[in-house]
Image (cartoon, rainbow, N blue to C red):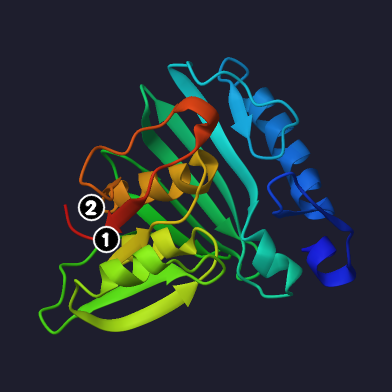
């Protein structure tokens, strides 16, 4: 938030996506903290110069600043994502929204929670799809013709565009019903949100209905859809 409020430098990565001082500083802070907290668990983080192996049975996936494009535009829609993978599946997720001081977290097989500031965490649950139409969240920074085509197959009541992994959290807390994503994402973009959605009672699967797994070659995701109902 200090960088967001007081300025920073930024540059372009090889894939033409932006990276800022805030990304790098958060990446260093989180990876160092996780190494101290759980030194036996490898960490795969977006801004690491060399990504680790994808063959670990258990590993963390870290996106130190998800929604960098919004951050650069001065929009307060960015998050910090930390997910834990075991046997190619997300089991634990934490998403923090610094501008709003809101924390989402969940353990698959347990519960999902939302905590605002110093208030007591509240259990969140996905909702059953309303009969009068779905509330759909989609990416603001990465619109897709395939996404628009998919939406035409749904009974959409409300369409919300947003940035960062908050879209997963909206499904998890029942303020949205579905989040389709046909554009490019990486595993650190989705692991935490995936775990929170499942902990809240929803599901995430590939666009063709298959199981959405982690530890893939290059850590790149296929198209996926997050649903509020199992």
Query: Seen in the image, is 162 located left or right of residue 205?
Result: right
Numbered circle sitting on residue 125: 1
- Residue shown at 82% from the left, 71% from the top: 5
Q: Are marks 2 and 1 in contact (CB under 8 Å)?
A: yes
Residue 203 vertical placement versus 127 (above, below): above
Q: Position of residue 40 (x, y in %)?
A: 58, 15
- Residue shown at 28% from the left, 77% from the top: 135
Q: Position of residue 188 (x, y in %)?
A: 54, 41
Numbered circle sitting on residue 201: 2
Q: Quadrant of residue 191?
A: top left
Whether residue 120 can be seen here: no
Q: Quadrant of residue 218?
A: top right
Q: Quadrant of residue 148?
A: bottom left
Please tell me which of labels 2 and 1 falls first in the chain: 1
Residue 33 vertical placement versus 4 (above, below): above
- Residue shown at 54% from the left, 61% from the top: 164
Q: Nearer the viewer, residue 213 or 177?
A: 213
How many residues crowd mark 2 within 10 Å: few (<14), some (14–19), many (20+)? many
Q: Position of residue 165 (x, y in %)?
A: 49, 58
């Amino acid at each position: 938030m200090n960088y967001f409020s007081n300025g920073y430098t930024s540059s372009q990565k090889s894939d033409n996506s932006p990276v800022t001082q805030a990304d790098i500083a958060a990446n260093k802070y989180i990876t160092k903290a996780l190494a101290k907290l759980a030194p036996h668990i490898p960490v795969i983080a977006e801004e690491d110069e060399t990504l680790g192996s994808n063959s670990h049975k258990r590993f963390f996936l870290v996106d130190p600043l998800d929604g960098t494009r919004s951050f650069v535009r001065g929009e307060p829609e960015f998050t910090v994502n930390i997910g834990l993978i075991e046997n190619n599946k997300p089991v634990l997720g934490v998403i923090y929204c610094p501008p709003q001081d809101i924390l989402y977290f969940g353990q698959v097989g347990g519960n999902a929670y939302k905590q605002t500031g110093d208030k007591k965490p509240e259990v969140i649950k996905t909702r059953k799809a309303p009969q009068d139409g779905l509330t759909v969240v989609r990416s603001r920074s990465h619109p897709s013709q395939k996404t628009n085509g998919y939406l035409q197959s749904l009974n959409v009541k409300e369409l919300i565009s947003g940035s960062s992994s908050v879209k997963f959290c909206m499904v998890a807390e029942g303020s949205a019903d579905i989040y389709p994503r046909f554009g490019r994402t990486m595993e650190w973009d989705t692991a935490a949100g995936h775990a929170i959605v499942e902990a809240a009672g929803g599901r995430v699967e590939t666009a063709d209905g298959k199981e959405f797994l982690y530890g893939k070659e290059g850590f790149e995701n296929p198209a996926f859809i997050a649903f509020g109902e199992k």
